[in-house]
Image: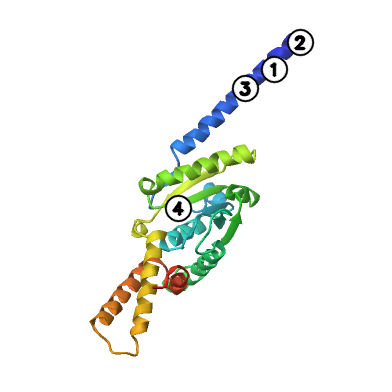
Amino acid sequence: MIAMMSFLRALATACASSIVVALCILVHRVLFPPVLSFPWTMPSENTRGRKAEKGMTVIFAGSFNPPHWGHLVMIRYLADRYGRVICCIGVNPNKRYDVSPQARARILRDMLVGSSADDGSRRRDNVQVEVVTGYIWRYARAQGASLFFRGIRTWAADGREERRLQILNSWGPLLLGRMWPMRTIFLEGDPRYRNVSSTRTRKICEDVRRLRTRVGRGEGGAKDDDDDDDGDELSRSVDELMTLVPRCVADRIVEAYGTEA
């Protein structure tokens, strides 16, 4: 009996210690998240780590509202490094979307295919785009994913909001799914595209749609200085849009996100 009691006390102590260690690991993940800064590293070919990564499935989650060059270069990097990349667009049933997740997914799929023709880059066939209803961490586990990636401009710019999401992704699986949470890695943007954001892209789309409408109304009639100004402004807005999104989906994005004047 004494031996049994000693064993139970030792077991309880070990369990308590394991829980404390697990909590410390989760708190450390939230306070000191792994951030992969640019230039993004790539393991050397023919190494054990490189071979292991080529067999891994990773999740790249975002709203892609709309998708843009900043997203695309991150996806290409992940596709070159890992065996399978799933771009997940989450659905919140309590939220109304001006552009549906399904429409954003179609634009992103077309971007992944068409952008290769635009800039002559190699097409990545190991990327898929999925709309996910419910917890993305639960979907990721069902897909056998090993890592969870989030794209950010910089941690200084986006870290506050991302930390809130990371807390949900860290504690949600543990409390709701009774599973150890997947590791989240934050991918800081290529400096060439750090000024690119979905908010800015939506604003330029509105400008292009508005100016196209005004220029269209002026066609066929007598032109004045205002018409010339609108045409010049439209050209500048279109040029700026081309720095934000690939040409292959520019008109689609303007149609989806531009508002009538």
Crowd band around label 1 with a 10 angstrom C-alpha radius: few (<14), some (14–19), many (20+): few
Amino acid of disc 2:
Met
Amino acid of disc 3:
Ala
Quarter of the image containing the N terminus? top right
Q: Mark 4 = which residue?
A: 151
Residue, x 58% and y 41% (percent of image)?
Answer: 172
The answer to whether residue 169 is visible is yes
Structural distance between the alpha carbons of marks 4 and 3: 38 Å
Helix, strand or loop status at disc 1: helix
Residue most extreme to the right: 1
Q: Residue 66, position in %: x, y? A: 46, 63
In the image, is 111 to the left or to the right of 225?
right
Q: Mark 1 = which residue?
A: 8
Q: Nearer the viewer, residue 69 or 229?
A: 229
Structural distance between the alpha carbons of marks 2 and 1: 11 Å
Residue most extreme to the top: 2
Q: Mark 2 = which residue?
A: 1
Helix, strand or loop status at disc 2: loop
Crowd band around label 3 with a 10 angstrom C-alpha radius: few (<14), some (14–19), many (20+): few
Residue, x 42% and y 70% (percent of image)?
Answer: 258
Whichever of callouts 2 and 4 sits on the residue coming sooner in the sequence is 2
Q: Residue 35, position in %: x, y? A: 43, 45
Q: Which mark is residue 34?
A: none
Residue, x 51% and y 30% (percent of image)?
Answer: 24
Q: From what the image shows, is residue 260 above or below residue 223?
A: above
Q: Which mark is residue 14?
A: 3
Structural distance between the alpha carbons of marks 2 and 3: 20 Å
